[in-house]
Amino acid sequence: MMTRMVMQRIGIGFATLIVVSIIVFIATSILPGDVAQIVLGQSATPETLAALRAQLGLDQPGYVRYFLWLGNMMTGDLGISKAGGATISSLIGGRLGNTMMMAGFVALISIPISIALGLWAAMHPGTMLDRIVTFGTLSLISVPEFFIATVAVLILAVNLHWLPSTAYMTGEETFVELMKALAMPLITLVIVVSAQMIRMTRAGILNVMSSPYIEMAILKGVPRGRIILRHAFFNAIGPIINVIALNLAYLVSGVVIVETIFAYPGLAKLMIDGVQTRDLPLVQACAMIFCGTYVVLILIADVGSILSNPRLRNPK
Amino acid sequence: MTDQIVNKEAEEEVLAKLDAFAELPDAPPKRKFRLTWIGYVSCAVVAFWLIICVVGPSIAPFHEMDMDGDDSFLPAGEGEYGYFYLGTDYLSRDTLSRILYGARNTIGISLAATLLAYLMGITLGILAAVKGGWIDMGISRINDAILALPTIMLGLIVIAALGSSIPILIGTAAVIYATSVFRIARALGQDIMVQDYVEAAATRGEGVWWIIRAEVLPNAAMPLATDFGLRLVFVVLFISSLSFLGLGVQPPASDWGSMVRENLQGLTYGSYAAIWPALAIASFTIAINLIVDDISAKSGGSLAKKMV
Amino acid sequence: MKDDKSKSELNYQDLTQSDKDLVAKLVRGGFSRREVLKLSMVTGVSLVAAEHLLFDGKAAIAATPKKGGSVRMASNLHGPDDQLDPILFTSTIDYTRGRATYNSLVQHANDLTPQPELATSFEPNANATEWTFKLREGVTWHDGSKFSADDAVYSMNRHLGENTTSVINSVLKSIKEFKKTGPYEMKAIMNSPNSDLPTLMGLFQTKIVKEGSTGGGIGTGPYVLDSFQPGVKSVHSRNNNYWREGANLDAIEITAITDPVARVNALISGDMQMVTQIDPNAFRQVESADNVTLLSTPAALQLGICCLKNSEPGSNDDFVKGMQYIQDRKRIVKRVLKGKGSLGNDTPISFAHGPDFCKELPQREFDPDKAKFHFKKSGYSSAELFVAPVTSGVEDMCLTAQANCAKIGFDLKLKKVPTDGYWGAVWMKEPLNVVTWNMRPTANSQLAIQFGPGGNWNDTFWNNDRMGELLRLSLAETDPAKRHDMYCEMQTLVHNGSGMVIPAFSNINDGIANNIMGMPTVPLGQLGGNEWPEFIWLA
C-alpha cells in the first residue's frame, strides 16, 4: 500500500517536472532580449546578431527548440550553454557539488540544534530560556538575510579578520581551510534555517500538547518530559519533517542572496545567471534539478508524516 | 421544495437550542480571544505602523526626494539643509522622512499581496478539496510546479518581463505565496471533508457551497488567520530580497528593504542609515509574529497540526 | 614607530613593511604637503627626512620589477557568457583573460599611442590605402608551435565579412581584407583611408589566435591558461617562453565578485589583491584602510542620457535644452561620484583625450531658470526616463535630475529596468534612456561611434551631414591647428544639436593592495585598461 502511494507520487512528480519545463520555457520566452543580444551586449549590430543567432540555432521556432530539448533531456543530454559554449553538464557539475556540500553541512549542523532547542523550549514553556529562544528566533527570521550576512561579514571578516569575507575555494585546500572558507555562508544559512525549524518544532509540539490524549497522560501522572519525548514528539513529527524538507529545498534553490554576497559558486546563482543571459538550456537544466529535489523531499516528508500518523495511513 | 423550507426551520431550531446550551454553566467554554501583555504591546506596534502608513507623508519633516546636500551618510543632528533626527542616507536624503514615506510602500504592498494570496489560495484550495478529481489534479500540479521553482527567480522573470510597478509587485508576490496557502487550504479542506458532521450534511443533501460556508470555513478560520501573519512576514522579506537584486519599488519611492540595501556600505564606517529601516522592518514583522504566537497558543486544536 | 632621526639619511629600504606600504600608498596618490606631514608623524622623522623618504620611495618603487608571487583579481561581473574567443569579448573579465593569454598586433601605451606588440612595425603606403605590418619572429604558442603570418591574417579576417559575429566588426569597416604577403608580413587592404588604423588594431578584441581555432585559451601571451570555469574563475601560470620580459608573477587567479559590498570587503580583508569598479560609496572605506589603495584614473567614462531625436519628446530641441540645463553637474561630480570624476559638457570628449579636447567650448552650467523656460517652451510637463545600473553613478545621477526637475514643476518619471536585456530592448528604442560609453582610444573613434550619421550606435539618431564630413576630414588632416579646429567644431555641433546629455565623466576606480607595483594607467578600461597582467610585480 505504501509502495503504491510512493509509485503514484513519483508519477505525479514526473508530471510536475514536465509542467515546470513548460512554465520555464514560456517564462524565458516572454523576457525582453535573447541570448545573442546579451552576449553581444552594447556592441551588437543587426548583422552580428543575425550571424550569432544562426550559429546558435536560435532561428528555429520556439516550440521546435523546446521539443528538441525535451528529446535530448530524456536521453540524458543536457545540451550546450548558448551563452558561452560550454556543455551544461560541465557548468552544472561543479556547482551542483558545491550546493550539495553546503546544504549537507548546514543540515548536519542545524537539524540537531533546531530539534534539540525546539524540544527544550517546548518542555519548559514560559521560562527564561524559552523566551530567549522564542524572541531570538523571531528576530532572526524577521530581518532580511542580506542584512544578517552583511553584519556577520563586517564583524567577523573585515573587523576581526577571523574568517575570509568570501567563500573563495581554490580546489586544493585541506579540510580545515575549506571549513574556514565556507564558515561565513555556513553561519548565515544555519542561523536563517534554524530559526524556522526551531519555531516549527516548538509550535508543533505545543499544538499536540493540547490534544485530549495528552491531557489523559498528564492526568495519569506521566512526567512532562517523558510525555513530550515519547508521545508528543512523534505525533508532531509530520509538520517538523515538512519544515525540514522545505528548508532543504530552499538550501538547494533559494540561496541566491547568500551565494551572491559570499561569491559562492552554487546552483541558485547559476540559474539566476542563466535567466539574465537568457540561456534557455541552462535555466531548464537547473529547473529540472530544483524541481526534482523538491519532489523527492516532499515525498520523504509526506511518507514520514503518514508513517507517524496511523489515521492517515488508512484514509477513509 | 417544501422539504427544504422544513429543513431551514428545523435548522434554526437546532441552532437556537445549541446557543441556549452554550449559556449553561457547565457548557464547554466559548473560545475566548485573550492576549498576554506581549500580545497587546505587539498590537500597539502594528497599529502604530498602520497609522504611519496613512499619515506618514504628512508628518515627515522632508519630502522623500529632497537631496539638497553634498555630503552623504551624515549622522543624526544638524545637517546641511535642516535637522535630521536619524541622519542622512547615501544621497543626503533624510532617513526619518524616507522611513515615514516608506511605510506605505512596504506595509501596503505586503498587506495587499498577502490578502490577494489568501483570496486566491483559499478559493482554489477549498475548491480542489471539495471537487476533487481532475480539477484537483490539474491545479495541484501547476501549484507544485510554481512551488518547486525558486521564488526569487520567478520574481526576477516576471518583473523583467512586465516591469517593476507596484501592481506587478503585488501580483507577483500574491501568486507566489498563494501556492503555500493553496496547499494548506486544500489539506484543511480535505481533512474537514472527511469529518462526520460533513458526511452528515452531505447525506442530508446540502450543496457544496453550504458545506464550505457553514462547515469548512468556520473550522479553518483560526488556523488560517495565524498563518496569515506568517505569510505577511514572508512577503515583506520577499519584497526586500527583490530590492537586493535591484527589482523592488521604483525610485524615488522609498521602501524599507531598498533602503537597507542601498545604505549597506555605510555600515562599514559607522553610519546607521541601513539600521533604521532594518529596525522598522523587524519591529513590524516581530510584532505580527508575536500576535500570531499568542493567538495560536490559546487556540490549538488538531486542525492546527496541518498548518505548515 | 622609529626613533627620532632628524638626519635626512633615512632610506626607504630601512623602513618596516607597514611603513613601506604607507609610503607606497602616498607615492601612488601623489603626495602633497599634507601627506609629507602625515608620513612625518607616523614614522616619527622630521619633515625634511619624510620628504626624502617619499622621493626615495618613489625611485625605489619605479625600479626594476621583481619576479615571483601570485595575485588574485576580482572583476565585477561574470557568468556563463565568459569567453575565450576574442571576437566576442565584451566584459572586463574577458578583456583581462584576453590580455593574460593572448597578444594583439599593437598595444596602447599610457598616453594611448600605438606600440609594437606582435607587429614590429606598421607603415601606410602613400595614400593610406594599404598598411603593411611586419610581424615578430621567434614567437611560440603555448602549445609549442610557431607563430606566423597565417595566424595573424586568419585572426584579423575573422572580424570582417558578412557572417562574422565580431563585436568590433563595424569599427573595422574601413578595412577590406587582410592579406599575407610573406611568412612574417601582412597587409591590410583598406576600403577607405584611415590614419588611426594602428590604434584600432590594439582594441581588446583584436587578440591573435591560432589559425583555424576560436581561441580556446591557446595564445602567445604572458600567462598560460591552466583552468577555466565560466562564471567561477580561471587560473593562469607564467609563460616561461614568453617572447619578452613582462610576465613577472608566478600565477594569477581571475574571478569576479558581483556584489559591490562583498568585492570591497574581499579587497580590504586581503582575500583579493585587486578588484575593479569600486562604488563611490566605498571610497571612504578603501581610502581609510592601511593595506590597500584606491586607484582613480581620470577617463572619459561617460554617464549619459539619450534623448532620441527620432521620437517625442527628444525631437523637440527645447526639451533637450531643458534636460541639459537641469543637470546639476558640479553636485553630481561632488555627491554622486564623490569627487572622482569630471564635469561633462554634453560631448563625449573630455580632457583625457588630450589635445583633441575642445577646452574653448564654454562649460554648460546648472541653470534651473533656463531649464524651466525651455521646458515651458517645449510644451512638455512630464517625461519618462528608462534607467538601468549600466555603470555606477548613473542611477543616482538620474535621481538627482528627478529631484531638480520636481523643484521647477517638471515631472521626470524614472523607470528602473534590469541591466540584462537593456542593450537589446531599451537602449536606442525607448525615447529617453541612459547610456554609458567606455573611453575609446581616439577622439575620432569616440565621436564616430556615437555621432557618426547613420552609425549603428548613434544612440540619439542624430544625423548631421557636416558631422560626417568633419569626421572624414579630420582623419586625414595633419596640421595640428586645423585639426583642433575641426574637433572643436564637431564638439560644438554635438553640444548644441544632438540629443545627448552628458553631465559628467566618471573616473575609473579600482582598488589594489599596496604591494602591487608597476600598474599601468591606460584609461580605456579597469585596472590600467586591463593591461596589468603584462606589467605588474609584487614588492
Image: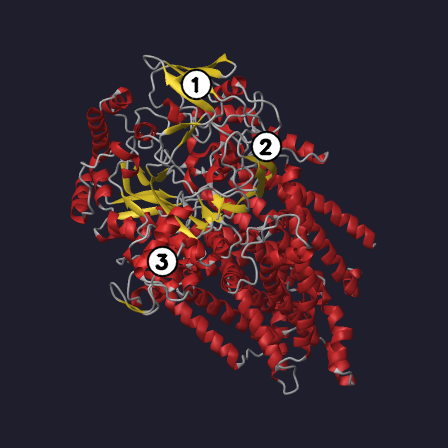
Query: B286 or C486: nearer the eye?
Result: C486
As shown in the figure, which amino acid type bears the numbered disc 2?
Answer: Gly
**Residue C326 vs residue B190: left or right?**
left
Q: Are marks 3 and 1 in contact (CB under 8 Å)?
A: no
Circle 2: element type: loop
At 24% from the left and 63% from the top, the residue drawn is B81
Q: Nearer the viewer, mark 2 or mark 1?
A: 1
The residue singled out by tag 1 in the image is: C133
**Residue B105 at x, y percent in the picture:** 41, 59
Q: Amino acid at mark 3?
A: Tyr
Is there one chain holding both mark 3 and mark 2? no
Q: Residue at x 20, y 32 (%)?
A: C492
- The residue that label 3 is drawn on is B90
Tell me the crowding category of disc 3: few under 14, some 14 to 19, or many 20 or more residues within 10 angstroms, Cα based.
Answer: many
The amino acid sitting under disc 1 is: Phe
**Residue B210 makes an appearance in the image:** no
Discs 2 and 1 lie in a common subunit = no
